[in-house]
Amino acid sequence: QNMEVIMRKHIKNNVSWVGKIDWELQEFHGSDYTINNGSSQNAYLIEEEKTVLIDTVWKPHSSEFIDNLESEIDLNTIDFIVCNHGEVDHSGSLPALMEKIPNTPIYCTENAVKSLVGQYHHPEWNFKTVKTGDSVDIGNGKSLVFVEMRMLHWPDSMATYMTGDNILFSNDAFGQHFAVEELWADKADQCRLWEEALKYYANILNPFSQLVKAKVEEIQKLNLPIDIIATSHGAIWRENPMQIVEKYYEWSQAYQEDQITIVYDTMWDGTKKLAHKIAEEIAKQSPDTRVKIFNISKTNKNDIMTEVFKSKAIAVGSPTVGNSVLSSVAGWLDFLRELKFKNKKAAVFGTYGWSGESTKVLREELTKYGFSVVEPEIKCNWNPEESDFNKAEALVSALLV
Ligand code: FEO
């Protein structure tokens, strides 16, 4: 038996958690999402008259996952598998599992069939495609009802609702990349829990905010009793589980706090000095506004985006290099584009020695990405002097209007 064997954790009645808590995971989506506090892939086992497995875990943990399941049940007793989402962190153990129980039905959306076949090349698997409202009887008066969650966050995503026990298996939605050994949100470090939930929303779900809003309204209209929201990452919600749904609703509507985030990179500290002058000026003109300053090359990009998400305005600075901005800033701007922030102001600043295009490039890019860029800017030749620093006053006033 594997020393790392997970064992089941009890969720409610005949429902158990059988996933993997990975305290050592450091990144996700390749290296695009940095993980600071571990994460988990939550899979669930339902043992009513029917035995059902909801999702699996990532491939590196597949033998551990299957060993664990086999220590709990005879795999042949699994009546069917629900695959809420085809991404590898939840489907990665399917190939090894299906070798052991090859004809077991897999309930998933039509799009999930595309993604699973595309990734694992097993068109012969026994797929049962489902749509919103379809349900399967699992005995003891309980059933599973499927709800498509298209683009939350993939076209194949869905959630599964278990009647009787009132559990919503929400997959990625409402989750966090956060290792919580006790599983429950109410047991978790609250500060980190909300930080991680917000980071997950800002960096993964924000581009789909309009769909999040519509989906939350749809869920609320169904008026389903929800006792537990069993996510596929991080903590599971049982105390007032709708609190995370309400937060998503709030976050989905161009969320902002009284915060301004200043983001820059610098070659010889000229642009850095301007960044700090702008921060000082915000504190002077609006002492209640929270100000944060990040050098793009020295702070994790996901953490910066979480701060941008919370901000009502940003100021972005770069010196001119090669008739444009620094490559670090250009890469960061492209990530900013992906996240589709709404209803935020922006200001631009930067130093130059010769041609001086950086502020023009920043203005054009930020405008394209939906920011309303204020007119006053600081474009400074060589090192800033008093007349350059003085321009911060007008720039900040415009941001605060
Ligand atoms: Fe979209 Fe947790 O995978």
Image (cartoon, rainbow, N blue to C red):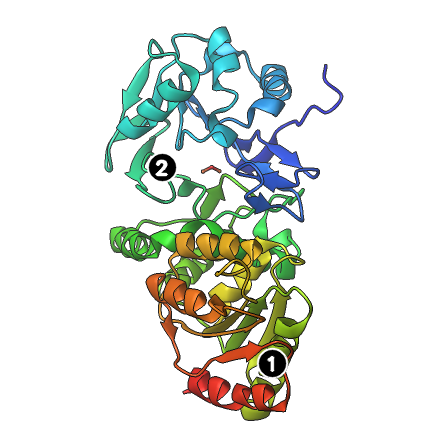
Residue 336: give x, y in percent of width and height. Answer: 45, 57
Of circles 2 and 1, the one toward us is 1
Q: From the viewer's perspective, is 346 left or right of 130?
A: right
Which residue is labeled 1 in the image? 279
Is residue 63 placed above or below 159 in the rendered structure? above
**Which comes before the other along the chain, label 2 or label 1?**
2
Amino acid at pointer 2: Ser
Is residue 8 placed above or below 196 in the rendered structure? above
Tell me, yes or no, if residue 253 can be seen here: yes
Is residue 115 placed above or below 273 in the rendered structure? above
Quarter of the figure that contains the N terminus? top right
Which residue is labeled 2 in the image? 157
Residue occupying the point 72% across, 18% down:
2
Mark 1 secondary-structure assignment: helix
Q: Foreground: 374 or 214?
A: 374
- Mark 2 residue CB less than 8 A from any atom of ligand 1: yes
Residue 211: give x, y in percent of width and height. Answer: 30, 52
Residue 207: give x, y in percent of width and height. Answer: 37, 53
Rate crowding at label 2 as few (under 14), some (14 to 19) or many (20 or more) other CA atoms within 10 Å.
Answer: many
Residue 175: give x, y in percent of width and height. Answer: 50, 47
Marks 2/1: CA distance? 42 Å
Q: Foreground: 155 or 188?
A: 155
| Residue 217 figure quarter | bottom left
